Amino acid sequence: MYLRMPLFTFLSGVVYAYRPFREGVANFMQKKARRLLLPMLTVGTAFALLQAITPGTNSSISNWLLLHIQPVAHFWFIESLFLVFVLIVVLEKLNAFSSSGRWAAVFIGSAALYVSPLYSQYFSFSGFLYLLPYFLLGMGVQRYDAFKKINSGLIAVAMCATLAVLIFIYHQWVPSFGKRALPSLLLGVLACLCLLSIGFKSTLLAKIGVFSYSIYLFHVFFTAVPRIVFGKFGIDLDVVFFTSLVAGIMGPIVLELVLARFNLTRVLLLGKAPHRKPKVSDKPALLPLMPLRQANAR
């Protein structure tokens, strides 16, 4: 709660800052809707149906008419992130990020909404309020080169403090905080900044990270199988965990490699743009063949 989704959203903001919205609202939002909402509708609906008919699972759908109006399981994140992009486009058009000072004002406003009592289960609005500060933080850190302006000693102190608080919470030496409480926000912000400041690099994780969205979409389909099957035979929990971990990572990667080959599944299930068909003009021009006699004469 304090790190997983905040970090994922923080990194989304960092990535966005590399290629921020410039112009063309309709085109930008169309791409975001394809990338986020299409997989949410297709994969999310498939998950809800499978969960409803599979023995041993707990279906969270109480009213099928409100499917996706009320978020489905972990797909709430996708719906919330889309709302974040809608707001970001509006703020970009208003030049709300033209300076670090303006960005800071927007961030403080998002923090106020974060801790506010505003709540709605529809269209994952509450999730939107939960994610917004972390997205803005990631975007701001990247856009304004924040780490160049922060003393390294201060970062080290923040890292130690964050680690200490997490350890205290884990061991229940201090009471845990609510999801949208101010201490949770402060802890999430510090944790994200500290982890980014470490500068840890891994080729393996980078390769896996390319498939992070597919892993998020499809991991539940692959982790459920070992859990259900091994659970019936009383297999050790450590084995179940390790098997589910491997299946939840490798399964979606293999699935994306297959789905990405066909335009229909590439668009509907992955939200990626279809493969562009080569135009006639794209083909290399053929040089005129020289008559054999003329060639021999030369």
Image (cartoon, rainbow, N blue to C red):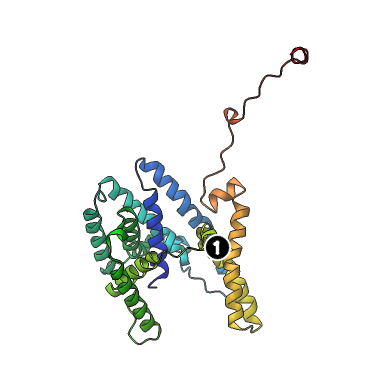
Horizontal relation, residue 15 to residue 143: left or right: right
Vertically, is 207 above or below 2?
A: above
Looking at the picture, which amino acid does disc 1 mark? Answer: Leu
The answer to whether residue 54 is visible is: no
Q: Please name whichever residue, 134 or 40, is drawn nearer the observer in this view of the structure.
A: 134
Q: Circle 1 is placed at which residue position?
A: 204
Quarter of the image for residue 118 reads: bottom left
x, y percent for residue 250: 60, 64
Report the quarter where the N terminus lies. Answer: bottom left
x 35%, y 59%: residue:
138
x 27%, y 51%: residue:
97
Horizontal relation, residue 230 to residue 201: left or right: right
Quarter of the image for residue 280 reads: top right
Q: From this viewpoint, which residue is outermost toward the front?
A: 298
x 31%, y 55%: residue:
145
Q: How many marks?
A: 1
